[in-house]
Image (cartoon, helix red, strand yellow):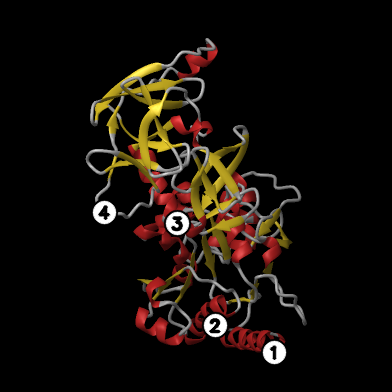
Amino acid sequence: MPKFHLMTYHGTLLFTNGTDLFHLPIRNSEPGYDLITVDLDFPTDQHRRFLENAEMGVLLGSFDMQGEIRVHYDYKNRTISLERNDQLACADIEAKVQFNRVERGGWEQFFLISESEYRNILFILQNSWIVSSSEAVVTNDKISFCPPFSINFGNEKFVDLRFNKLFFNDFPYRLIVLDKGWSIDEICLFRPLVFSAAFKNEFVLEQLYICLSSLHEFGNYAGHVHVITDQTRETLLQKVPLLDEARTTVDPLFPTDFVGYVASKYQILDWPLARNYQPLLFVDPDIVFDRDIGPMMHRIAISHKICAPMEVFSPLRTSPSVGASLIQQDGLEPRWSLGFNAGTLGIPNIAEHRKSLETIREIIRNRAHLFKRGEFEWIDQEVANYVSFKTEHFDTSSITKFANLTLDQNPSPLGLVHFWPPRKPKSKRDAMVEYIALLRSNR
């Protein structure tokens, strides 16, 4: 028989000290109070009762505490009442619950929270979230519970649990909520990860250190950083003092050629902890962050697709760098579609997008096996564009406005600058250093 906890009209839960009932905050830390758990046969015929316009409730069961407490379910109000000796339980503004009412109002109603829903609520309280409709970030300290039976996300969204049977769909990444009981919105987990990859070449590694330093100095980033590299974690922390040691991880990898360097980003799929984050942002090491990246990360988190900045100068029909050859060989017609730059990839979460990412890396490996390892010049970018066009259709609108793919003489900071046009690693490093100096002089 399913187990349930009991929520009051105020958004508190029922506890006991062994003899009496109390309603206390879900985050209750007072010793001597145990959370009430009851075994009840919850009715599953909700829609049938709705179709029949049923007004009558049903007795779900009972439990003993200073006498038998009978639990009645009200189909119309979607709540229960607790009755002992013909008296209804009332959770008033004081902490104690007393059986002293005969009429059923708000304070005499309770809401059933299943064990799994309770665990999910605790997860909500431990994390930060983005309200999709407003793109507002609500940190866990701003989440509270309030009447009636509602979770308050920092005054951005009030979720009445009575009208949100779908509340935990796609959990833990997205919460589907029905605002006002009918208006669809989403609340998305916000536990960001930025990751990059760099190997061997001293100037490429210096690009990485500049990139990660700018992420904190100008990007105002405070989340986790993960680096796929042949350098040690100690070296990384020494070269980038702004990194938070507690939120920096390294995946040791030792590729031997350009194909391995470029395709290494997809190693993130094999890092077990990657599934704990939303959103994830991959950046090539030749990127400088020049503005708070919060708005860009928010857009990735609420997107339902992998995000990448559009290359307005790269038509899918004619540009091999964005997959024109693969698209043509597969007999597809891209017409006037444009490609994207794979040096910046925003992944809402690994769980929902693993299939697309695995398809990209599998095609890279297969073509290297079927032809030769260096057969295609643009490695993952052309394959990613091909996979996007054929099956996935990446989101090229959400983060394009945050990315400068060409550095103008006096660029307006958008979020990041990608120093991607081909040039020698030292020359690219020098350009990044100059741009950092410009940012500091303008600050």
Q: Which residue is mark 2?
A: 210
Q: Residue at x 56, y 61 (%)?
A: 345
Q: Residue at x 47, y 41 (%)?
A: 10
Residue 79 visible somewhere in the drawing: yes
Choose the circle earlier in sequence order: 2 or 4: 4
Amino acid bearing label 3: Asn
**Rendered view: 298 above or below 245:** above
> At which x and y percent is residue 92?
44, 39
Residue 127, numbered label: 3
Q: Residue furthest top?
A: 52
Amino acid bearing label 1: Ser
Amino acid bearing label 2: Ile
Question: Which sits in the foreground, 321 or 216?
Answer: 216
Q: Which residue is mark 1?
A: 441
Choose the circle earlier in sequence order: 2 or 1: 2
Q: Residue at x 51, y 34 (%)?
A: 164
Foreground disc of the pair 3, 2: 3
Cβ atoms at labels 1 and 3 below 8 Å apart: no
Choose the circle earlier in sequence order: 3 or 2: 3
Numbered disc total: 4
Side (left or right) of 97 relative to 329: left
